[in-house]
Image: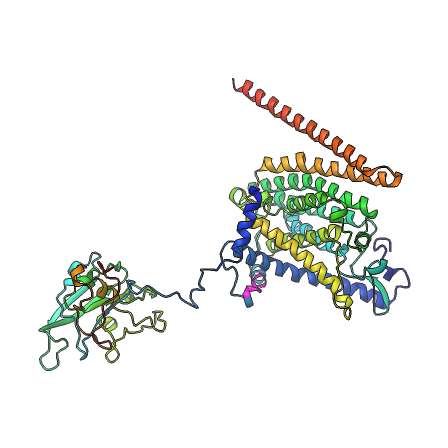
Amino acid sequence: MMILGTDPLLSGNVDLTVVLIVLMKVGIAFAFLLVAVMLMIWFERKLISDMQNRIGPSVAGPWGILQTLADGIKLFFKEDLIPERSDRFVFKLAPYLSLVPAFLVFAIVPIGGDFRNDNGGVVTWFGHETLVQVADPPIGVLFFLATSSIAVYGVMLAGWSSGSKYPLLGAVRSSAQMISYEAALGLSIATVFLMSGTLSTNGIVSEQSTWNWNLVTTGVIPFIIFVIAGTAELNRPPFDLVEAEQELVGGFHTEYSALRFALFFLAEFMNVITMSAIAVTLFLGGPNGPILIEAIPWIWPPIWFFLKVGVFLFVFVWLRATLPRLRYDQLMDLGWKILIPASLGWFLLIAALNIANDQGWQSWIVILVGLTVISVGALALMAAVRKAKIQRASQAFEEAN
Amino acid sequence: MGYLQGFAVTFRKLWEKRVTVPYPESKRDKPARLHGRHVLNRYENGMEKCIGCELCAGVCPANCIYVRGADNPENEPVSPGERYGFVYEINYLRCIHCDLCVEACPTQAITETKLFEFSFTNREDAVYTKDELVVDESTGLPQHLPWEDWRPGEDLQTSAWMRATSPSGSSEYVGKVAWDSELGYGIRAPEDNQIGES
């Protein structure tokens, strides 16, 4: 019971109805994700072609909306190829290591529920009180971080087990990239924990129920860092070095074909959706929003949730259409020298402010001192980086002569 | 702000009009003087214009036209003159659609339609014979062969380029009719914007 956490559904007797409700939730989440991925791939292709003055998919179904389905069916019937020099077991395992975490993360996202009047998102279905999310573990967002770390294994093992050089290079890149950005991602989420005082996603959303979204209460910077680090975590442009076509053919999935390739693709786009959902949950109040028509109050939280997710999906595609890919050292510089120090500094500032509130200190003095400390730290960091650069350059110069 | 300008560009493109046409379903209008597949024209009384002089074959830079003239049969003449085009073949695997044959023709017998959408499954089919090239006996319109993609109205324009540049592109002849009548059309008006016209 602990793993499903604070869901009131499981606090009383667990009878058949309760089991059926849980199964229904799982089924809905599963089906929703698959349909959403299908629509997301179509949406991305359509939108990016709009941004490039093209038409995009337009033949399968109205506005080409069934294009993804057609592609999926095609991939299903293609020859399934396993390279001779691959590690067969790991090669077959890797796609599932990508896919399963992508599914799992969505389980902790509240997509609806009544959050008015400190209600805590509880709704009543078939006479049972429950939350509109598959599970609400007390470790909440840590579960998200854990599963998204497992997804790194999917990419890494796929590249390694292919027994081919381009996938291996892609895998090396991806493991380095995803691990370094996970630090910034985690630190930016930590400020949310500080403000909400809980790890549970339901708790975080309940905290934001009165328009005090974490976007504002944590001061925008963590949100920006989260979006940038999240984009890098998803291996999406401009951080798609993992599958840089011009350099690595297809990156880690070069040797994959047919259904296994489709699984990677599915996982990739599913991750985009879940990352958007997590961002909405953490920073934009999840399903919170005004109830516009009182007659059907239950329909508005999901609508607000999907609208917010939609905005994120649009922004992800927009980023892809606009920005060129980063060079690898630029990527590492951004991750280690800017995002991690910035998120760490901001985290400390927020922590100091929290303590100031508890102790009754003057908050503007705390902010002033905090910003001074942060800027001194930033200057010291910049000086150190500069020094190191000069040293390296002079060393190289001496070696050359 | 250089970063954000890029985002503005891609966002603006969202609302711009598309120039792409979903091709096989709908087609863009072709220019009136496009060089396409040839036709052999007829006079208004149904007689063929070709006199089998082989000037077109002689001028053809791709050597794709083969003509053999013959004397008209006395009781049922094919063309008004002494001789007619007995064999007339154009090999469309060689033709470059330069329209020199159209310029060379003394009787405006050969002109070009706007049709370029045709394909073959073997080399023999690429050689159009006189039966296929000559315009329809009753309407004067080009024949619609099964492997050609004609759309309504496309078969009306068969001689615009000839009427725009003839004769010799000299500005003294602008607006002057220097060609004979055609089956189905009568004497066609000169094309606008001939050379020298302002």
Establish if A320 lies above or below B78: above
Q: Is residue A67 magenta?
A: yes
Residue farthest along the right direction in this orientation: A12
The image position of residue B33, as x and y in percent, is 28, 63
Q: Quadrant of residue A103?
A: bottom right
- Residue B64, image x, y percentages: 22, 60
Across and down, in percent, residue B107 comes to 15, 69
Extreme residue in the bottom direction: B75
Q: Residue at x 59, y 36 (%)?
A: A330
Magenta residues, start to end: A63-70
Q: Is residue A53 left or right of residue A1?
A: left
Q: Report whether residue B71 is seen.
A: yes
Q: Is residue B45 above or below residue B148?
A: below
Q: Is residue A75 left or right of residue A210?
A: left
What secondary structure prevails in the magenta region?
A: helix
* Residue A130 located within the stretch drawn in magenta: no
Quadrant position of residue A381: top right
Q: Nearer the viewer, residue A347 or B130?
A: A347
Asked whether, in this view, residue A94 is left or right of residue A58, the answer is right
Q: For the point 18% across and 67% down, which residue is it?
A: B176
Up-down relation of residue A257 to residue A35 (above or below): above
Tell me if residue A27 can be seen.
Answer: no
Side (left or right) of B33 relative to A366? left
Task: Provide residue A372's location: percent of width, then percent of height.
Answer: 74, 31
- Quadrant (top left/top right/bottom left/bottom right) for the N terminus of chain A: bottom right
Residue A91 higher or lower than A71, as above or below? above
